Amino acid sequence: MQLTYNVQAARRPVNLTANSDLIDRVRSEKGNLSALFEQSMITFLAERELMRWKEESQASFSSYNRMIEERGTLSDDIGPGL
């Protein structure tokens, strides 16, 4: 799933607190704290969307799995020779 958001939205300053050792280590590696924070938010939101999609699709998954258990797959009917 691809997370969609307005990549051209205005940037807004926020106040955060974080572990000072992590901040120092990231800065010593020339890491961009803002970019890391944004990437972390993107990852978080993508994971939440995937979790929500799985929850919303669970009934379909269960139904499909029941059908396969009862009837088998199409390839079961075709046989091993093809």
Image (tube, grey):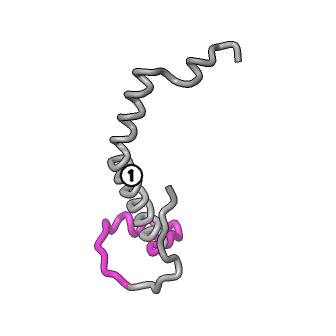
Residue 48 placement (x, y as % from top left): 36, 57
Q: Residue at x 49, y 68 (%)?
A: 4
Where residue 58 sits, quadrant-wise, is top left
In the displayed structure, 22 sits above or below 16; it is above
Report if residue 19 lies within the magenta region.
yes
Choose top left, top right, bottom left or bottom right for residue 15: bottom left
Instruction: Point out residue 7 in the picture as x, y percentages from the top left corner.
Output: 52, 76
Q: Is residue 66 magenta?
A: no
User: Which residue sits at x=52%, y=66%?
Assistant: 29
Percent of width and height locating residue 6: 49, 77
In the rendered image, the residue lying farthest to the left is 17
Magenta region, residue range: 13-34
For mark 1, give the secondary structure: helix
Is residue 25 at all visible to an observer of this figure?
no
Q: Is residue 37 visible?
A: yes
Q: Residues within 10 Å of mark 1 (few under 14, many from 20)?
A: few
Q: Count the marks: how many?
A: 1
Residue 42 to residue 69: above or below: below
Which image quarter holds the C terminus? top right
The type of residue carrying mark 1 is Trp
- Residue at x-position 35% and y-position 53%: 52
- The foreground one among 28 and 72 is 72
Q: Which residue is mark 1?
A: 53
The residue positioned farthest toward the right in the image shown:
82
Q: Nearer the viewer, residue 36 or 49?
A: 49
- Considering only vertical position in the picture, is 30 above or below 62? below
Q: Residue 31: x, y in percent?
A: 51, 69
